[in-house]
Amino acid sequence: MKEKVLTAMSGGVDSTVAAALLLRQGYEVVGATMDTGSGGPFAAAEKAAAFLGIEHHVVDVRRQFEEAVIGGFLREYERGRTPNPCVVCNERVKFTAFLPLMRRLGINRFATGHYARVEAAAGRFLLKRASYLPKDQSYMLFRLKQEVLSATLFPLGEMSKDEVREAAREMRLPAAGQPDSQDICFIPSGDYRAFIAERLEHAGGEIRDLCGRVVGRHNGLPYYTVGQRKGLNLALGYPAYVVGLDHAKNRLIIGREEDLYCSGALCEDINFIALECLQEPMPAAVKIRYNAEPQEAVISSADGGRVEISFREPAKAVTPGQAAVFYQGDVVIGGGTIVRAR
């Protein structure tokens, strides 16, 4: 009998090609789409599944998505941090929501259209960067646990985006010409400030420089993030950047570009993949945001199960709330959430 694999399908080109490739490899593929309550791609996913001739299910994840992803997004902004909701969704929703359906259908394997790779080595399942680095999504997947990685397939891990689109055209898939999605899925307009304004109470406050001088007023801390330059409406005779958010005093702290650089960072909520725990300081390349280049550093254990990062060269705009992901070569060692820069 063919091995069954449940494939997460959005109706887009990546997930549709992933499902098609698995069919070519001899798997029995079942498609599934999440109903997040944020406007679902059900029609496109159902069309793709029908084209491929596979069974398709819609799974209601509205409660989990509202609590873990949207709620978490808003709670982080309330704390004066800048969240990454896709990381939370992958851990708390996308890679777990389909488990009841998989059990009911007797399916043990799960696949997505992410650009990443999984490899078994030395008794562990390793998460690795995609072969095509411009589309690598391993940063967004660093919170996945061993039991999830052991059952997960990433059919696009060895492919470039051009190769995926060429495969879609060759197979005449309905999603072949579809553009990539760029926005946060629950904020399709892309205007996260308006989304926050409708849901969070916030008040304006002082903007201060690093000497403590009041230089202006802000519209509410959730509208700002470390490294931001636009929207400050300040005339100081030099380009001003957000260098910190003082949530306790509702103050926005600004400085010059050189003030954005730091030598290290502290991370919490750590998940290790390539090892059980960090026994001693370890060299690693660290990504402090999705689109950032990895920076050489040393990671070491800190109190409370946290990790201290010491950068070889100063890092720019290290932002509390964002993920810091640790790499050695293509292998994801693990990662955590940035608490503060230092």
Image (cartoon, rainbow, N blue to C red):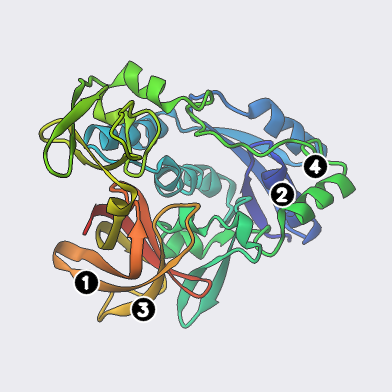
Q: Amino acid at mark 4?
A: Leu
The one nearer the camera, 49 or 189, is 189
Residue at image coords 47%, 83%: 122
Q: Amino acid at mark 1?
A: Ser
Count residues near mark 2 (Cα–Cα under 10 Å), then give few for <14, some for 14-19, many for 20+.
Answer: many
Q: Badges 4 and 2: C-beta atoms under 8 Å apart?
A: yes
Check disc 3 and report its element: helix, strand or loop. strand
Q: CA distance from mark 4 to mark 2?
A: 8 Å
x%, y% of residue 163? 78, 56
Q: Amino acid at mark 3?
A: Pro
Q: CA distance from mark 3 to mark 4?
A: 46 Å
View extreme (front): residue: 237
- Quarter of the rendering occupied by the N terminus: bottom right
- Quarter of the rendering occupied by the C terminus: bottom left
Check disc 2 and report its element: helix, strand or loop. helix
Check disc 1 and report its element: helix, strand or loop. strand
Q: Badges 2 and 3: C-beta atoms under 8 Å apart?
A: no
Splitting the image into 4 quarters, where does residue 242 fall? top left
Q: Which residue is mark 3?
A: 283
Q: CA distance from mark 2 to mark 3?
A: 37 Å
Residue 217 position (above or below residue 292): above
Q: Is residue 74 left or right of residue 152?
A: left
Compare marks 2 and 3 and give the one earlier in the sequence: 2
Can residue 214 be seen in the rendering of this structure? yes
Compare marks 4 and 1 and give the one earlier in the sequence: 4
Q: Amino acid at mark 2?
A: Ala
Q: Which residue is mark 1?
A: 301
Count residues near mark 1 (Cα–Cα under 10 Å), then give few for <14, some for 14-19, many for 20+.
Answer: some
Q: Badges 1 and 3: C-beta atoms under 8 Å apart?
A: no
x%, y% of residue 191? 46, 24
Q: Which residue is mark 2?
A: 19
Q: Which residue is mark 4?
A: 52
